[in-house]
Image (cartoon, rainbow, N blue to C red):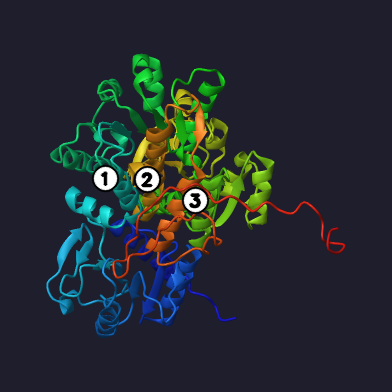
């Protein structure tokens, strides 16, 4: 077998894919790609990385979603012009991945215009063709309105579900509180709800607030209770002010507003239809409250929807957190860089998030060890090809340590002390003190800045210590733009399905954490398959269908109808293994 790409080439490919993701906030997995021109080793490295991340090389007869150009501008121009002939609404992203020189002549297609920071539209070719250069640093430009437009065009499933709610008139007279990370995708969800007839109010924690996006929502007429500079007391005042608008439904992330309503606004609960929670860490305390009889409203477990957990937690969080970590590592001062970056990584936890983090780390060339307290999940990690070891042992030689548990003190004081000097520690989940920094500081440890959102933790008497990113914050939110747009399109479609459940059945639901209707998953998945240019096996003849056909020539999806699940055929209980049953 010929030797594979060398380390500098693989590092270039990693940086190119991460810059594409930072510029576009788009997904790599499930997308069809084609490579044009370039050195064979560069092509091999990029091909191997894209496919390891879940992208698929496009067959000759298929359209592509991403056209990666590595060769000469002449080669690229011809390829772009061929691929630009596509149905309206089918987006093509042309990626200038020239390693040493630009591979795309941006002037060859007529005037270009900014579509969002780092992305150019090419209106002379098509409304659906965009250019991205991986040779330029990502632009630090708020441009909130442009980012909202970009997110909206990439959320066809949520748009379809919201249109169904609008056409049915279900949301008229309903006030919905959105308490989530305030970035472009959440803003689009809020506007879709507003356009479908709801009155929408928005809250976000300070470290999860993009002020430019908050201002864009205010300009659109939505009350927004969020400030990136808010202190803890100010955040509580903002959260209570949002609750005092008396929303009928809460869409929450982490269950903080749901819990706050139970703690300090109990008079609100009898007027509520319910809430929806989209995180594992948020559902845990709600289930405890329900078991004690303390939960006063039904809460739909959006996190447990298959179209959320299997994709948001695994592919979205995996890509966005690992990419955000490595982007921050690239910015560390030279003395703070891990000596063997790209060598060894430890993932704490092997739930859906841990699976995704491990998958992306391995695709980027890391040797991954998993630390998992659940022996079944640990065995699953072993079968997936990862080493398995106790966390305090695994971190001793690791270059990178990522927690994916959503559990306090996962990276405990003992684990921090055991970390290799210069190891990078980050969180891909998100609860306070998932990295036990308060306990470390109580011992006299110090923290010194060594880069953007990066601090070295040094214990008394030690010459060096690990570098902790963003004080253990959920790194894809606090240091990047969150999960890719297509991933949040699935999650928010499930949120909209939960809203419909509460509108239609809230009075009937138990005051507990309730599962999402399986029909929501069914409809969301079929709509997403259509948006990705595929389709599922048709339902058996005579069963209740969920029509989600692609509208010809639009690249979009048709109406999303949450019908009842088709009943499984009842099996014949008699065995035929020994001949026809009598």
Q: Nearer the viewer, mark 2 or mark 1?
A: 1
Q: Can residue 403 be seen by looking at this rendering? A: no
Q: Residue furthest right?
A: 578
* Residue under the image location 34 percent in, 20 percent down: 271
**Picture quarter with the N terminus:** bottom right
Give the Cα distance between marks 2 and 1: 10 Å
Q: Secondary structure at mark 2?
A: helix
Residue at the disc numbered 3: 314
Choose between 494 and 9: the one closer to the eye.
494
The reply to whether callout 2 and callout 1 are in contact (CB within 8 Å) is yes
Please tell me whether mark 3 or mark 1 is closer to you in this view.
1
- Give the total number of marks visible in the rendering: 3
Image location (x, y in percent) of residue 60: 42, 82
Q: Earlier in the sequence, mark 3 or mark 1?
A: 1
Of mark 2 and mark 1, the one earlier in the sequence is 1
Could you say which disc has been placed on residue 192 in the image?
A: 1
In the rendered image, the quadrant that contains the C terminus is bottom right
At 35% from the left and 60% from the top, the residue drawn is 557
Residue 504, image x and y in percent?
40, 35
Question: What residue is pinned by disc 2?
Answer: 492
Residue at 40% across, 67% down: 533
Identify the disc placed on residue 212. none
Mark closer to the chain start, 2 or 3: 3
Crowdedness of circle 3 by 10 Å Cα count: few (<14), some, many (20+)? many
Residue 370, compared with residue 239, is above or below; it is below
Q: Position of residue 231 (x, y in %)?
A: 27, 25
């Amino acid at each position: 077998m010929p030797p594979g790409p060398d380390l500098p080439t693989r590092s270039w490919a990693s940086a190119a894919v991460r810059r594409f993701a930072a510029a576009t906030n788009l997904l790599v997995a499930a997308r069809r790609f084609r490579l044009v021109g370039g050195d064979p080793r560069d092509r091999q490295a990029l091909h191997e990385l894209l496919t390891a991340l879940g992208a698929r090389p496009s067959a000759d007869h298929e359209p592509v979603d991403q056209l990666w150009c590595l060769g000469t501008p002449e080669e690229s121009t011809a390829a772009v012009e061929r691929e630009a002939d596509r149905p309206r609404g089918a987006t093509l992203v042309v990626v200038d991945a020239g390693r040493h020189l630009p591979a795309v002549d941006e002037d060859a297609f007529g005037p270009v215009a900014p579509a969002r920071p780092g992305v150019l539209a090419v209106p002379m070719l098509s409304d659906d063709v965009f250019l991205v250069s991986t040779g330029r640093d990502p632009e630090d430009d708020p441009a909130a309105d442009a980012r909202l437009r970009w997110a909206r065009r990439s959320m066809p499933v949520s748009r379809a579900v919201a249109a169904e709610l609008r056409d049915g008139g279900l949301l008229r007279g309903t006030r919905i509180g959105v308490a989530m990370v305030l970035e472009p995708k959440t803003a689009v969800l809020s506007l879709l709800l507003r356009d479908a007839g709801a009155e929408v109010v928005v809250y976000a924690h300070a470290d999860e607030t993009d002020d430019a996006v908050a201002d864009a929502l205010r300009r659109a007429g939505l009350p927004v209770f969020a400030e990136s500079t808010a202190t803890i007391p100010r955040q509580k005042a903002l959260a209570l002010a949002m609750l005092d608008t008396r929303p009928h439904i809460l869409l929450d992330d982490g269950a903080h507003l749901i819990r706050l309503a139970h703690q300090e606004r109990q008079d609100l609960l009898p007027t509520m239809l319910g809430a929806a929670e989209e995180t594992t860490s948020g559902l845990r305390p709600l289930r405890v409250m329900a078991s004690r009889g303390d939960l006063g409203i039904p809460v739909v477990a959006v996190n447990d929807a298959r179209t959320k957990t299997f994709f948001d937690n695994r592919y979205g969080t995996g890509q966005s957190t690992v990419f955000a970590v490595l982007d921050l590592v690239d910015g560390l001062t030279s003395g703070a860089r891990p000596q063997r970056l790209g060598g060894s990584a430890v993932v704490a936890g092997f739930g859906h998030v841990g699976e995704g983090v491990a998958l992306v780390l391995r695709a980027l060339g890391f040797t991954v060890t998993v630390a998992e307290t659940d022996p079944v999940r640990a065995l699953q990690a072993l079968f997936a090809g990862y080493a398995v070891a106790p966390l305090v042992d695994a971190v001793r030689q690791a270059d990178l340590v990522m927690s994916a548990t959503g559990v306090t003190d996962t990276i405990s004081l003992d684990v921090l002390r055991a970390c290799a000097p210069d190891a990078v520690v980050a969180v891909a989940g998100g609860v306070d003190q998932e990295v036990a920094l308060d306990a470390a500081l109580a011992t006299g440890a110090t923290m010194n800045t060594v880069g953007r959102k990066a601090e070295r933790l040094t214990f008394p008497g030690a010459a060096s210590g690990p570098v902790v990113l963003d004080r253990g914050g959920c790194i894809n939110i606090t240091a990047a733009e969150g999960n890719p747009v297509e991933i949040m399109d699935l999650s928010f479609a499930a949120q909209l399905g939960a809203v419909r459940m509460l509108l239609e059945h809230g009075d009937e639901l138990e005051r507990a954490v309730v599962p999402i209707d399986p029909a929501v998953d069914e409809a969301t998945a079929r709509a997403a398959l259509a948006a990705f240019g595929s389709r599922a096996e048709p339902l058996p003849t005579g069963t209740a269908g969920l029509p989600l056909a692609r509208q010809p020539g639009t690249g979009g999806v048709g109406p999303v109808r949450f019908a009842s699940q088709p009943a499984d055929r009842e099996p014949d209980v008699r065995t035929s293994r020994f001949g026809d049953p009598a």
